[in-house]
Structure formats: C-alpha cells, structure tokens
Image (cartoon, helix red, strand yellow):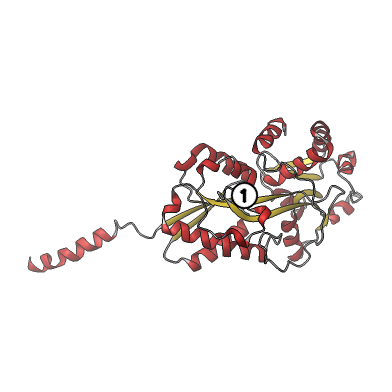
Amino acid sequence: MKNLLRLFPLVLLLALGGCSKGSPRVLIFSTSEDFRIAAAQELLDSRFPEYEIVIDYYSTGSLAAKLKAEGTQTECDIIGELESGYMEGILDFLADLSFIDDSVFLEELVPSHRRYLPFYKSTGCIALNESFLQARGLPVPSSYDDLTRPLYKGVLSMPNPKSSGTGYFFLKNLVNVRGEEAAFAYFDRFAENVLQFTTSGSGPVNALVQGEAGIGLGMTFQVVSQINQGVPLSIRFFEEGSPYAAYGASIIRGRETRPEVREVFAYYINEVSRVDKELFSPERIFKDQAGTIPNYPADVKMADMEGIENLGEKERLLARWPY
C-alpha cells in the first residue's frame, strides 16, 4: 500500500502531462503553390522548433471568401499570401503592422494603411508546349487574337478569374487595353477554344506539362521552374506585355498580441519571403533584392494593370464572367 501511495504522485503527474497545452500553435493560410509552401514550412520549422506552425492552402477566391465571411473569428492567425485587391476588402480584419520595418520594401508596394505588406509580385506569360503544337501542325501564336482562331480549339488553358488571381489579371489587362465590352466579347471567342478554365493559377502550366494542352495563360515563375527541371516549355509575351498583381501577407486583427504570432510573422515577411524570391519568384519587392533565376525573362514590358487593386471593380467584373 505504501508503494502505491509513493507512486501516486508520479501517476498523477503523467496524467496531467497528457492534458498540457503543448507548444504554441500558429496557423497560416496561404494561396502559394505546394512546393513554395513546403519550402516555407521547412524554414519556419527550423527557426521555431518550439512552436507548432501549420500552413494550410486555399485557392485565391476560396481564401478571400472565407476570410471575408469569418472576419476576426477565423482560426487563421497569419495570411501568408493573398492578392492585394482581396486584402483591401478585408482591411477591418487585419492588424496594424507598424511594428515591422517596411523601409526594406519598394515604396510603391507598401500600402499607406500598413495593414498588409508585400510578399511577392506575380507576373503572367503565354506558356507553350511546342512539341504539342508541332505534333498537331499548329503554329506558334503571336497575339491574343490568334488564340481565338478555330485551329486552336481544345488547345488552350486559362485559370478561372473567379477563383484565381492569375486568371483575373489576364482579364483585367484586356479590359484596360480594349475596353470592358470588347474584352468580354474577346473572351467569348477565346472560351470556344479552351480545354479547361482551371481553379488555380497552376492549372494551365500543369496541363502543359502533362501534355493535355498546348498553350496556357500562366505564371511566369512556374513556367521557368518547369523549364529549369528539363520540361520542354517556352515563354512568349504578346504586345500588351506581362500582366501582374502584388500579393501581400498580414496578421488577423487581435492575433498580433500573441508573441509567437509576431515572431513568426516578422520572420516570414523578412526571411521566408527573401528565400521565396531566390528560389521561385524573383520579381523585385525588396530595395536591395539582387540576382535572378536561370531562364527567367529579363527586361519584360509590364502590362497596363491600372485598377488591379480596386476590389469593387474586381467584384463587378467577376460577376460578369460566365465561365
């Protein structure tokens, strides 16, 4: 009996240990691709072994809708990456980031309200699987209008603007250049040749890699990544230039009071972002950013993206999108 009484404190300690709170948990929602999320996760786990850090993926449209609906009641602590237009629509739910030194970023990318900070700049291109085209006797297109020719039926892939920021910046660029009515009339013709409007911005490049499509409207860095892995793709830019959008990172209002969230966010926006630029998306966001990625296009003309951050305009245009 005495032995049992001596063991009781140890048994009680072990039982209570199973009810301990454990490591502080930080939940990040991101629209990044899986390989970029994996790289970020590795960096965060290495830097903060004392925290449980989880990165969950959402498509751009899904994440924007979720955060708008849930507000500060969301389980998300940090928004790892979301297109800036959508960020503007949820400013009331975002924390003041004045505790971060934003002087390291290009001034034009830092919003005056400091509710989010730049994480990366995404640019678009026309991606080609030339072997696919050659096997079918199809010429390489030289303009957006070429893509509406009947000979390209079933050959095209584009992200759906309603779910993808990449899809939206292609739409917005042509609205700016051609006017709204002409742009939507164009996409009516374009849609006749589309194999699939994909949910994510990665979809068209994946379709090209798998040999399902021959021409994709996609993200430049993704195409370059495939080229550098030996996949025989090529890149073109039409007269209008390369469309683009800025993506930001932020903290949900109220979560900035937690030390682990502040620490993780500061490291994420300053260090994880830099590695992301070095490995995947080299478009410049830092003042001192240098270097590039092999085969990444240089001196590319940027497209007319005026109004890309206007959420009201975006919602109105997407309401018209029928595909």
Foreground: 263 or 232? 263
Q: Is residue 243 above or below residue 190?
A: below
Foreground: 239 or 12? 239
Image location of residue 64, percent across then percent down: 58, 42
The residue carrying mark 1 is 111
Report the label total.
1
Tell me which corner region of the image, top left, top right, bottom left or bottom right, holds residue 160.
Answer: top right
Quadrant of the drawing holding the N terminus: bottom left
Relative horizontal placement of residue 29, taking residue 174 as reference (left or right)? left
Q: Is residue 128 above or below residue 305?
A: below
| Residue 114 visible within the image | yes
Q: Is residue 57 above or below residue 8?
A: above
| Residue 213 visible within the image | no
Relative horizontal placement of residue 137, taking residue 8 as reference (left or right)? right
Tell me which corner region of the image, top left, top right, bottom left or bottom right, holds residue 186.
Answer: top right
Foreground: 216 or 50? 50
Give amino acid for label 1: Pro
Image location of residue 60, percent across then percent down: 62, 45
Quadrant of the drawing holding the C terminus: top right
Image location of residue 2, percent across then percent down: 7, 68
Instruction: Tell me the residue at 87%/51% (across/down).
Output: 133
Instruction: Tell me the residue at 89%/54% (across/down).
Output: 134
Image location of residue 206, percent across then percent down: 72, 52
Question: Crowding near pointer 1: few (<14 within 10 Å), some, many (20+)?
Answer: some
Q: Does dot 1 land on a helix, a strand or a loop?
A: loop
Foreground: 115 or 174? 115
Q: Is residue 104 above or below residue 84?
A: below
